[in-house]
Amino acid sequence: MTRLSAAELIDLVLDEGSWTSWDVAPDRTGVSPEYAAELTAAQEKSGCDESVLTGEGLMKGRRVAVVMGEFAFLAGSIGRAAADRLIAAINRATAEGLPLLAGPVSGGTRMQEGTPAFVQMVRITEAVAAHKAAGLPYLVYLRHPTTGGVMASWGSLGHMTVAETGALVGFLGPRVYEALYGKPFPPDVQTAENLYARGIIDAVLPPEEIAEILDRALTILLAPRHGVRPVPAPIPLTPLPDVDTWDAVTRSRRPDRPGVRRLLKYAASDVVPLNGTGQGEHDPGLMLALVSFGNAPCVFLGQDRRGQTTEHPMGPEALREARRGMRLASELGLPLVTVIDTQGAALSAEAENGGLAGEIARCLSDLVTLEAPTLCLMLGEGNGGGALAFLPADRVIAAQHAWLSPLPPEGASAIVHRDLSHAPDMARAQQVRALDLLDRGIVDRIVAELPDAADEPEAFCQRVGAVLEHELAALLDAGPGSPADRARRYL
């Protein structure tokens, strides 16, 4: 595949003529004559004085800092001088409050320098962590190839990570593996496409599409947190029709009922999907994204009814993916929106072996203590612990026919009456309806269905979106609630 140089990719991503280098000449003190000759040859070959270029520029008019690898300089390897340059640039981006774009391409640590170069990854990682701790975006584009210590440090710490189409991306270089073990590395493992399929990276895109996705992400990540124009509260329909509990349950189960995908299609002003835990897990029953409703930005965690099937119900990996979203919201100071719409978490040996109960508990703990404003939308079915794991929030809104129950009503009927026929009576007795939860103070606001979301999907989703925009604008102004306040609504 054709590999762009660092300068070519910078020119492709940044506005024309906006690049300003931050680099100073590297210190070559104490370098052996043999190594000095290699460095000189690398400079002549690449046109660069080191394996990374750093600086700033404008991307669609927005000021950004950039650290970019150059493979033509000793395979993009990182020695002490390259590490010093990287760290200086990351620290400067942090001090100046700039979002940081990283484009690593590297075979890893520079073997000519050995362990003293290898341990620089600790310093680089600390600098990236400090940048993120300052609430500043760190976005990564993994290029072909990115391996070794680079992949295991600044290549894997992005708030959002995209990889180049067809890129070789992984930890152990395939040549090293073959030399050590006498056989080729298994094919199609260390590829961008495989990492995406396994929930390790967020997208796979060619270089010419990078500026667009990075700009959209930064538009959400850097949206104002304060002074957002207040959005008038949508006029509620009062009084809401007193639909029978079992009628609400059956309506919520209609296969044509709008879920999170149609909600975002009709109600969001922008959506940048993310993918997986970043640690090798992905669940199609969860949608993780950066989203704006009007001018209000958020991290969005939606239980996706389309991705939850009998063969693949929502498992513990979905909750671990959700917890990635919670961390993003906390790190970036963005509101978090959770959406409940699930037939229930998986009841299986695999789910038990995956620590399902513990993941529910950790989601509850993370949400109750999250240092970011939180908003929960009860959109449809709300079965069991898998639904409860998304509930704790500063504000809770619900679709009129949404509900929340410790078990499906049929399961409750089986426990109490040893049959399924009492499910409607159990649903009524257990006060599962959104209207019942409103009376108890668990839900703050109901969004009407006229008469059913499935019969008016676009209009319903737009009403929900208007409420989300209104609530998010208020939460951005108010800030996160305390854990005690979040728990108090359940008294």
Image: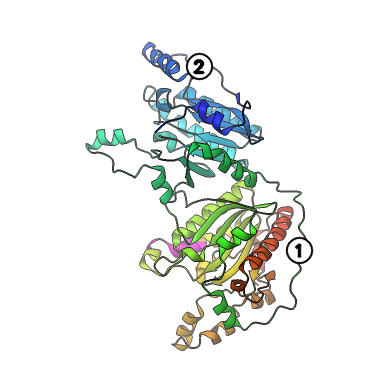
Q: Nearer the viewer, residue 438 or 47?
A: 47
Quarter of the picture holding the N terminus: top left
Of all residues, the one furthest to the left in this rendering is 182
User: Which residue type carries mark 1?
Assistant: Ala
Residue 368 seen in this snapshot: no
The kind of residue on which mark 2 rests is Asp
**Nearer the observer, disc 1 or disc 2?**
1
Looking at the rendered structure, the secondary structure element under dot 1 is: loop
The residue range painted magenta reads 353-361
Which quadrant is home to the C terminus? bottom right
Residue 45 in percent (x, y) is at 42, 18
Q: Which residue is mark 1?
A: 233
Q: Is residue 230 above or below residue 86?
A: below
Residue 85 highlighted magenta (yes or no): no
Q: Residue 437 occupies which quadrant of the picture?
A: bottom right
Measured Cα–Cα span from mark 1 to mark 2: 61 Å
Magenta stretch: includes residue 360: yes
Main SS of the magenta part reads helix
Q: Residue at x 62, y 60 (%)?
A: 266
Give the tally of numbered discs: 2
Q: In the image, which disc is placed on residue 349?
A: none
- Crowding at mark 1 (Cα within 10 Å: few <14, some 14-19, many 20+): few
Tell me the tag on residue 27. Answer: 2
Q: Nearer the viewer, residue 456 or 366?
A: 456
The location of residue 125, given as percent across then percent down, is 50, 36
